[in-house]
Image: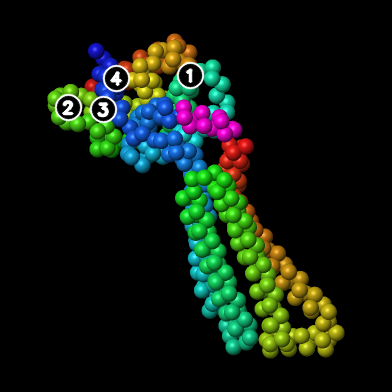
Amino acid sequence: MNKEQEHSFIALLERHQNIVHKVCRLYTNDYDAHNDLFQEITIQLWKAYPKFRGDAKFSTWMYRIGLNTAITLYRKSKRRVTTQDFDAVQFRIKAEDYDDTEEQQLKLLYSAVKQLNDIEKALVFLYLEDKNYREISETMGISEVNARVKMNRVKTKLRTILNP
Amino acid sequence: MDELDILKKDWNKEENQNFPKLSYNDIYKMLLKKSSSTVKWIFIISILEFLFWTIISFGIKDNESMKRLKGTDSETVLNVLTVLGYIVLCYFFYLFYKNYKKISTTDNAKKLMENILNTRRTVKQYVGFNLVFVVVSTVVVVLIEFNQDTHLEARVHEAAASGHIFMFYSKIILITAGILTITITILLGFYALIYGILLKRLNKNYKELKRMDL
């Protein structure tokens, strides 16, 4: 990569860094793990950047590389998430902003998502990011129909976790 | 509204989008930082290796052949060599530590490349020193033993009397060379395995940096 490319890469990443943060938020449970994953995704993005042709949007490409990195890291370390971890650190929900029932419901929902496997999490992540099925299928490299089927399964699974 | 939509609403709330904002420089530094963990491992492994040899040397201090060396010049020479060895090893730790500190605080690609090359050179010198040290101390001790060990001297005279002195010396030289070769092979294997892997990683990072700098 030449200096110019390097500059444009860092500038783009600086602008879109929230995407990486959000991936980290879903896949990690504490500050250190968040930072580690952020750095790992940054490095993977940088390595992959020479192959980025601009036929996809930079942000779409970031979703793809970010999720891939999170999924492979997750597989390597086989980290399993416990609900307590996530309650304590991750989603700094301020109690006064919610009434008890809504807060409770959100906590349960987030902890249910944390119990999904890495691929299912990626689907949920893209859904939360307001991506449509075409975008989800592009990012995850599956067909649109497949994305819909998988998404429905995830929803069912979430319901089973929430109402055992 | 299904569960995921409730979650989506919360996920996209402004207060949940507030992440620490990294600057251009923070991201740039992140890309450079990869080498520091490798260099840290070089430092840690060299200390572990040092401890390993120290424990081994204490272990063999009291065995039979070491006791025979007691009181001869070999003991003095060995002690001098050991102290000398430790001083040089300490110097190498210092260098490894310095390299580690330098690399973990560098935020300039050119400097980092220089430091990576420096670390590689230090590791090679360290391995070279250890190998030369093994050879030199073995040869020195064997030579002294020939001059001083009464038991060995008697064997030399015996061999001279029966006319086999040439055979006797060749045997000793062959055995010493054999043992040295085995020791060096084991050491080289060990270094190639551990430091080799670390150096390879450093080299990869160096190449990446170089490509980025072109």
- Viewport quadrant of the C terminus of chain A: top left
Cβ atoms under marks 2 and 3 closer than 8 Å? yes
Q: How many angstroms separate mark 1 from mark 4 (CA)?
A: 23 Å
| One can see residue B38 in this view | yes
The mark closer to the camera, 4 or 3, is 3
Residue type of the residue flagged with mark 1: Lys
Q: Amino acid at mark 4?
A: Lys
Q: Residues within 10 Å of mark 4 (few under 14, many from 20)?
A: some
Q: Is residue A43 above or below residue A59?
A: below
Q: For the residue carrying disc 1, how many other residues have a C-alpha within 10 Å: few (<14), some (14-19), or many (20+)?
A: few
Residue assigned mark 1: A57
Please report, as a chain letter, where disc 2 is located: A
Tell me the distance, in whole angstroms, between the alpha carbons under discs 2 and 1.
35 Å
Relative horizontal placement of residue B59, taking residue A19 as reference (left or right): right
Local SS, label 4: helix
Mark 4 or 3, nearer chain start = 4
Picture residue at 65% right of the left edge, 62% below the top: B128
| Residue A44 place in picture, x, y as percent | 50, 33
Is the Cβ of the residue at disc 2 closer than 8 Å to that at disc 1? Answer: no
| Subunit bearing disc 3 | B
Please give the label number shown on residue B15: 3
Query: Rounded to the nearest whole Å, what is the CA distance between mark 2 and mark 3?
Result: 10 Å
Q: Chain of mark 1?
A: A
Point out the stretch of residues depicted in magenta.
A1-12
Q: Secondary structure at mark 2?
A: helix
Task: Determine whether A154 is above or below B64 in the image.
Answer: above
Q: How many marks?
A: 4
**Mark 2 highlights which residue?**
A97
